[in-house]
Image: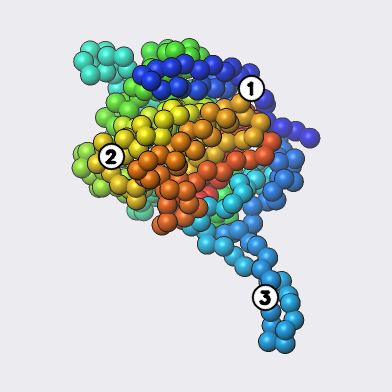
Amino acid sequence: MGKFFKSPIGFTGIFMGGKYILFIAVVFSITCTACSEQKEKTGSGGEKGGAVRKEAVVTDQGEHIEMDKKTDPSQIPEELVQIPEDYLTPAGEQGTVERLTYRTYESMNYESREKQLTKTAYVYLPYGYSGDRKYNVFYLMHGGWSDETTYLGTPEKPNVLVNVIDHAIQDGKMEPVIVVCPTYNNENPDDSADYSLALQLTDNYHNELVNDLIPAVEGTYSTFAEGISPEELEASRSHSAFAGFSMGSVATWHTFQYCLDYFRYFLPSSGNLTSDGTYMESLVTDSGHKPEDFFIYAMSGTEDFAYAGFSSQIEAMLAAPDGIFNASNDEREGNLAYRVQEGNSHDGEAAMQYIYNGLIWIWK
């Protein structure tokens, strides 16, 4: 049976500013040919518009029968769904990948703005993209030993994730969405391979994200933002999400730390920032936001050696004294969902499953 390419991975940890940061570096090569083994674990993910479960009912004659009952698609399923095998092949209705070039500044001295850089993000536009409708925006950050081409590929050579998104939109499992893949690499495309440097760059990335990338995206494509001023971008925050796996997950937590004004949804997977729940609560209170202002959908796997540290952070957040973080599978009732896939390791196959599960739930 074919599988995703299992990338070389490295693990280490470091204390910074009183916080223990876990880093998992992964080269994410999305060259999957089948996911049947994972599919056997939890099934194909249900029907269009929501998962289907069997519910026993009693007729007027007292007869017990089973009926299909469709769950609310706005609720996160109790188990992660698997990517259907046919989603790995091209869909009938295909989106496109574009290069978006924008200007920013060298990360370490960003505030001085002494050295300007030209960077590229890759942008997925759904089939039938039109300037006459508005689209939600899903920002997706890569991990270590990776770059802005890792998930979507390039216009000349799209990666299989593009097929998965195409199929999910075509089948009505997710809304048409704009996906943006940037990089925290700074002056060198190999920056993400340097662990210490990557920690600094993910911590600094919010400067580039808020001041340069988001305005470039929102100013180029048809989104819910009425303009690119901070006030207009903040007003459309419910239509923006930030996600990442491994070091991309660390970048996601930093985006939560610095950019709650600009994002409502955060999807970190298999990469933690801290084990201090009180510190995580302070990020919310210090930003002036309330528990109902955001939702975190976190994911990991039992065979992932980031799992223990990642789970510790989630547990610490839920146990923190002010009760800001509340577990729920419905954002109308809480703000944090954590799903764990039995058997998942720290690899590209797991990462794409997490991306898929996030995309088919968000904005339902």
On the rendered image, what quadrant is the N terminus found in?
top right
Depth order, front residue of 232/248 = 248
Depth order, front residue of 245/210 = 245
Query: Residue 142's x, y, as percent?
Result: 49, 27
Instruction: Judge whether 67 appears above or below 321 on screen.
Output: below
Mark 3 touches mark 2? (CB < 8 Å): no
Q: Residue 7, which numbered label?
A: 1
N-terminal of the pair, mark 3 or mark 2, is 3
Residue 3 appearing in the image = yes
Instruction: Judge whether 73 appears above or below 265 on screen.
Output: below
The alpha-carbon separation of the residues under discs 2 and 1 comes to 39 Å
Can you identify the residue that label 3 sits on?
A: 57
Can you identify the residue that label 2 sits on?
A: 285
Q: Residue 260, which numbered label?
A: none
Does dot 1 land on a helix, a strand or a loop?
Answer: loop
Query: Residue 221's x, y, as percent?
Result: 35, 42
Does dot 3 land on a helix, a strand or a loop?
Answer: strand
N-terminal of the pair, mark 3 or mark 1, is 1
Indicate left or right for 347 with 194 as reference: right
Label 3 packing within 10 angstroms: few (<14), some (14-19), many (20+) = few
N-terminal of the pair, mark 2 or mark 1, is 1
Residue drawn at (31%, 32%) of the image = 258
Depth order, front residue of 157/165 = 165
Q: Quarter of the image holding residue 10?
A: top right
Residue with the most extreme front position: 321
Residue drawn at (65%, 62%) of the image = 53
Instruction: Judge whether 299 appears above or below 65 on screen.
Output: above
| Amino acid found under the numbered disc labelled 3 | Val
Label 1 packing within 10 angstroms: few (<14), some (14-19), many (20+) = some
Does dot 2 land on a helix, a strand or a loop?
Answer: helix
Query: Residue 291's x, y, as percent?
Result: 34, 47
Residue 139 appearing in the image = no
